[in-house]
Amino acid sequence: MALVSQPVNEEPLFAEVDMAGDSSTVRATVVQASTVFYDTPATLDKAERLLAEAASYGAQLVVFPEAFIGGYPRGSTFGITIGKRTPKGNEEFRKYHAAAIDVPGSPEVYRLATMAGKYKVYLVMGVIEREGYTLYCTVLFFDSQGRYLGKHRKVMPTAMERIIWGFGDGSTIPVLETPIGKIGAAICWENRMPLLRTALYAKGIEIYCAPTADARDVWQASMTHIALEGGCFVLSANQFCRRKDYPPPPEYVFSDTEEDLTPDSIVCAGGSVIISPSGTVLAGPNFDGEALISADLDLGDIAREKFAFDVVGHYSRPDILNLVVRDHPLTPVTFTSAGSNKAESSAK
């Protein structure tokens, strides 16, 4: 495994590369880097620098972490206790809402699409999506021609995330068929939901993207299990963040730990990794800093592994166990015009 240093943003960014150079493979990169918190234009600029860097190494697919655009509000409580909110917490949410992006019709989505086309890569990007005044933790997909392909909304935010993010429904669990393989995503602890994973397997996922905010060692076991269970490549991208990557106090406070932190304290240690269908770690995990972590994916490995175990094929028992996925959009309000068969939904 080679380490190649390149200057990015006046500091070295290490590209951890495992590349076979075989034209039958797909070169994939996971990005491990921090958001510029509360500054979406600056985060987009950083994303483009990282995407250009990855493309210079020949990446065909680039996966960014959970909530890279908009930010993961680690350590924040948004002033919430049961039965009470605070003015400071309300203002914190206002700023977080302002940093989020509309999908798909926004300048930010257009810019991401343009970047994917400019650098000729398939792009999987974690964002905070804004629909009205509800936010969603979302992954966006773009092709190498600069086209927006679709999105996945996190179906189950974890713990305190539920106070700031809405819940995705079954209509945004895509597996996209592309010339480089069938690509889909599950976000962070969604990956621990067996039925969601089974839905992705049933759609034929081959390149399983797992943007996350979990830097614990045990996360690696989950990623290895999914690769083995699904017979797919798993690409997990996490942020590497220090305290100084967030606004300073009192504007932004890490609840219960702020007094123990210095500007250089690591608040998210990364752990981004690429794993093959056999459970072999192809690149990473990296806990050292911001990095581009790359590997060549031999899609032939999928058939080799599924010969022994195909979880929704020859190793399934639908006569005993099966899964029903309600994959239609769920909307809170539907307007039906009199004398018309057309329904207008409040959420598109």
Image: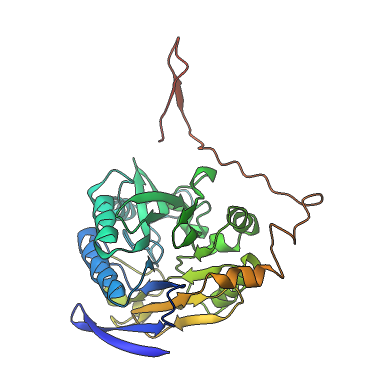
Looking at this rendering, what residue extends furthest in the front direction? Answer: 23
- Indicate the position of residue 60 as horizontal and vertical percent values: 37, 68
Front residue of 333/343: it is: 343
**209 in relation to 282, above or below:** above
Q: How is the image coloured?
A: rainbow
| Location of residue 327 (image quadrant) | top right
Front residue of 96/299: it is: 299
Who's the residue at 22% across and 49% down the image? 107
Looking at this rendering, what residue extends furthest in the top direction? Answer: 339
Front residue of 171/77: it is: 171
- Indicate the position of residue 44 as horizontal and vertical percent values: 24, 62
- Indicate the position of residue 317 as horizontal and vertical percent values: 78, 55
| Location of residue 223 (image quadrant) | bottom right
- Which image quarter is the C terminus in? top left
Who's the residue at 55% across and 59% down the image? 205
Looking at this rendering, what residue extends furthest in the right direction? Answer: 320
- Left or right, 172 with respect to 267, comes to right
For the image, the number of numbered tags is 0
Residue 250 visible here:
no
- Which image quarter is the N terminus in? bottom left
Looking at this rendering, what residue extends furthest in the bottom direction? Answer: 2
**232 in relation to 9, above or below:** above
- Left or right, 141 with respect to 204, comes to left
Front residue of 333/259: it is: 333
- Left or right, 48 with respect to 345, comes to left
- Left or right, 196 with respect to 4, comes to right
Residue 204 visible here:
yes
- Indicate the position of residue 69 as horizontal and vertical percent values: 31, 60
